Amino acid sequence: MKALEEKLLSPNNLEEKILKWKENDDKIVFTNGCFDLLHPGHVAYLYEAASLGNKLIIGLNTDKSAKKIKGESRPVNNEYSRAILLATMFFIDAIILFDEETPLQLINKIKPDVLVKGGDYTLENIVGAKETLELGGKVEVLSFLEGYSSSAIIEKIKKENRA
């Protein structure tokens, strides 16, 4: 698991990686989320995000911040489990946990070349879009793969258990 854990960065390690990548003129892509129950929609979205640059950084909500956003029954999987699953994807270069409800502090630290969110967002409601654009970066809203959602999976499981 050591190789996977190397993708899980502390704030200091993240700064070192970003400096190195920027010195190499790598194009840094950033996205964030809870990624509670990984499904094909997540994989398609993350793969497409990775294709927009050379390095993909995932801001992963901690358990504490996921609860604030999704409710007390979430996340289903703890932050370490979610991070390790993401780390198995060859096209993800770094994962950084964040405690806040939004990744704005992280975005301001990373200063990505491309900020990415899924098709259920608009430019106006993407946290960090204004800041990224002001620094000359791009903001991309990717297509949403219909029929996949962690919340829908959880509801289906609950429904089947009631029956």
Image (cartoon, grey):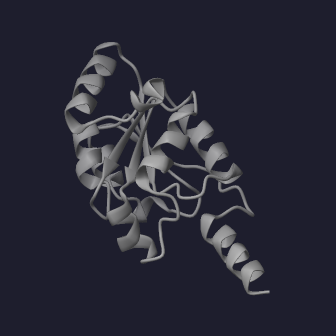
Callout count = 0
In the image, what residue occupies the spot 49% across and 28% down?
53
The spot of residue 150 in percent (x, y) is 61, 64
Quadrant assignment, res 159 = bottom right
In the image, what residue occupies the spot 53% across and 58% down?
36
The spot of residue 21 in percent (x, y) is 33, 20
Viewer-closest of 160 and 145 = 160
The spot of residue 63 in percent (x, y) is 38, 61
Image side of residue 142 versus residue 18, left or right: right
The spot of residue 130 in percent (x, y) is 31, 53
Image side of residue 40 versus residue 128, left or right: right
**View extreme (bottom): residue:** 163
In the image, what residue occupies the spot 58% across and 33% down?
89
Quadrant assignment, res 22 = top left
In what quadrant of the picture does the C terminus appear? bottom right
**View extreme (left): residue:** 12
Q: Is residue 116 visible?
A: no
